[in-house]
């Protein structure tokens, strides 16, 4: 009975590998190739394990003739030297072929969109390079069109980070002083969660992001709205935003005195799925909590807490940001 219970838990454990942050639930071209490589190797190694177990059982319980054959020089050389060498070479060739089929320069040449992602402690700066030569900045969320290749240029502003979206592609490091490349191609619409996969300091575990894949018409509409200035650039909330010094670090396009580049661009912050690099849900209460006590929520982040604001001012500022869709 004790042996049956762990086996009965196996489906639940496998279900834990599905979802919006799993390499076993591919939603992208490269992730699908990684998945095929994983299952090919897993099945092959499982068959090897079964063969080894069968040979072990025969060596222990088999008759004299069977044990004599297992101990023969020909079997030892064939099963112990020739088979591992040939099989590993074949797996290596298959792996190199699968992972080399997405040469960056060839794929990037046909990319419909170019995006630069800069890893910072502890958030992600996202810069869209539009066909007309202009740039559009966002943070902690990438929106990409389904079925089209997107060329990513990956950099870091401080220490080593690592960009990893298991549903879409493999992990690639962001190293100071160099630009690494990655091409994404989402095969279906949906939200994939990404993570910094290289320890980068105290808040490393709270440095996530989302990649939202939308059908091309929906993506075009999102891009059209995203290129506009902020929907609200006046009122008490906007004045409080400027008066509190928020504009020294944050940018809100269209709002005077809010042209900071140190921290995330907030022009359309309310349209994003999360706050603080996927640490909080995006709503008024979360905005208010973050402004007042962000160091408790995400210790070590670069934003000072604003405990000097009254409850009324805090709600006013949070409501203003919640209107920036």
Image (cartoon, rainbow, N blue to C red):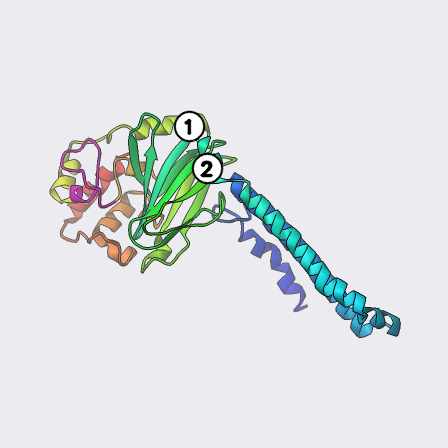
13 left or right of 57?
left
Nearest the eye: 49 or 94: 94
Q: Earlier in the sequence, mark 1 or mark 2?
A: 2
Judging by the rendered image, the residue that carries numbered circle 2 is 105
Q: Main secondary structure of the magenta part?
A: loop
Q: Secondary structure at mark 2?
A: helix
The verdict on residue 211 being magenta is no
Distance of label 1 from label 2 (alpha carbons): 28 Å
* Residue at image coords 36%, 41%: 141
Judging by the rendered image, the residue that carries numbered circle 1 is 218
Residue 145: x and y in percent read 44, 32
Nearest the eye: 3 or 133: 133
Nearest the eye: 220 or 319: 220
The verdict on residue 251 being magenta is yes
The reply to whether residue 115 is visible in this rendering is: yes
Residue 26, label in figure = none
Q: Secondary structure at mark 1?
A: helix
Can you say which quadrant of the picture contains the N terminus? bottom right
Q: Which residues are magenta?
A: 246-263
Mark 1 vs mark 2: give the one in front: 2
Residue 41: x and y in percent read 63, 53
Above or below, comparing residue 100 to residue 53 in the picture: above
Residue 218: x and y in percent read 42, 28
* Residue at image coords 18%, 31%: 233
């Amino acid at each position: 009975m004790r042996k049956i219970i762990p086996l009965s838990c196996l489906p639940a454990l496998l279900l834990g590998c599905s979802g919006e942050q799993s390499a076993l639930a591919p939603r992208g071209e490269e992730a699908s190739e990684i998945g095929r490589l994983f299952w090919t190797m897993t099945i092959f190694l499982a068959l090897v394990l079964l063969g080894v177990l069968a040979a072990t059982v025969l060596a222990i319980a088999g008759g004299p003739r069977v044990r004599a054959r297992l101990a023969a020089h020909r079997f030892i050389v064939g099963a112990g030297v020739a088979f591992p060498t040939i099989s590993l070479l074949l797996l290596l060739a298959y792996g190199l072929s699968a992972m080399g089929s997405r040469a960056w320069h060839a794929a990037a040449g046909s990319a419909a969109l170019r995006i630069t992602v800069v890893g910072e402690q502890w958030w992600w700066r996202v810069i869209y390079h539009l066909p007309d030569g202009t740039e559009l900045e966002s943070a902690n969320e990438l929106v990409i069109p389904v079925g089209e290749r997107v060329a990513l240029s990956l950099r870091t502003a401080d220490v080593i980070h690592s960009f990893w979206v298991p549903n879409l592609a493999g992990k690639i490091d962001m190293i100071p002083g160099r630009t690494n490349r990655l091409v994404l191609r989402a095969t279906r619409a949906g939200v994939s969660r990404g993570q910094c996969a290289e320890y980068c300091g105290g808040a490393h575990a709270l440095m996530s992001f989302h990649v939202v894949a939308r059908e091309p018409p929906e993506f075009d509409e999102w891009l059209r709205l995203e290129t506009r200035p902020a929907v609200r650039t006046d009122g008490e909330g906007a004045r409080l935003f400027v008066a509190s010094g928020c504009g020294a670090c944050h940018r809100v396009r269209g709002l005077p005195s809010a042209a900071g580049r140190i921290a995330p661009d907030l022009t359309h912050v309310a349209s994003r799925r999360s706050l603080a690099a996927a640490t909080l849900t995006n709503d008024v209460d979360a905005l208010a909590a973050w402004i007042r006590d962000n160091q408790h929520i995400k210790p070590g982040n670069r934003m000072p807490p604003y405990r000097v604001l009254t409850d009324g001012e805090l709600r006013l500022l949070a409501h203003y940001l919640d209107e920036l869709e």
